[in-house]
Image (spheres, helix red, strand yellow):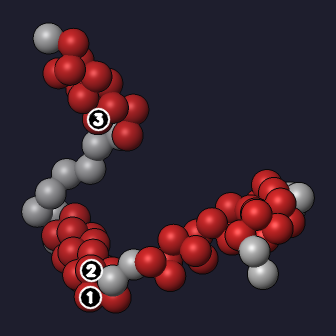
Amino acid sequence: MKLAILEKQALQLSAPDRAILADHLLQSLEDPSIRSAWDRESADRLAAYDRGEVAARDAEDVIADARNSLTQ
């Protein structure tokens, strides 16, 4: 199937279906070892949070701090 035809058909999908398709396509490009490393990292970070070793911050505060650091 030609890419242009496939693209045209994909764009006719609903937004949620396009998002699912995009996610599946992106996942097909990922290196499994990198995904595995990120899975371990996220599990380690959650465990550290559960043990009280790290504090959580609201996303809005983190984004505000990042924006402020870029404007200074």
Badge nearest the viewer, 3 or 1: 1
Q: Which residue appears at 33% of the width and 32% of the height? A: 63
Element assignment for label 3 = helix
Number of on-image labels: 3
Mark 3 residue type:
Val
Measured Cα–Cα span from mark 3 to mark 1: 29 Å
Read off the residue under disc 1: 33
Instruction: Answer with mark 3 or mark 1, whichever residue precedes in sequence.
Output: 1
Near-viewer residue (9 or 52) = 9
Estimate the x, y position of residue 24 in percent, counting from the top left.
Answer: 60, 76
Estimate the x, y position of residue 35 in percent, counting from the top left.
Answer: 33, 81
Is residue 39 shown above or below 21?
A: below
**Mark 2 surroundings within 10 Å by alpha-carbon count, few (fewer than 14), some (14 through 19), many (20 or more):** few
Q: Which residue appears at 49% of the width and 77% of the height? A: 27
Measured Cα–Cα span from mark 3 to mark 2: 25 Å
Q: Residue 62: which disc?
A: 3
Badge nearest the viewer, 3 or 2: 2
Element assignment for label 1 = helix
Q: Is residue 39 left or right of residue 37?
A: right
Q: Is residue 43 left or right of residue 23?
A: left
- The answer to the question of whether label 1 and label 2 lie on touching residues, with beta carbons closer than 8 A, is yes
Q: Which residue appears at 24% of the width and 29% of the height? A: 66
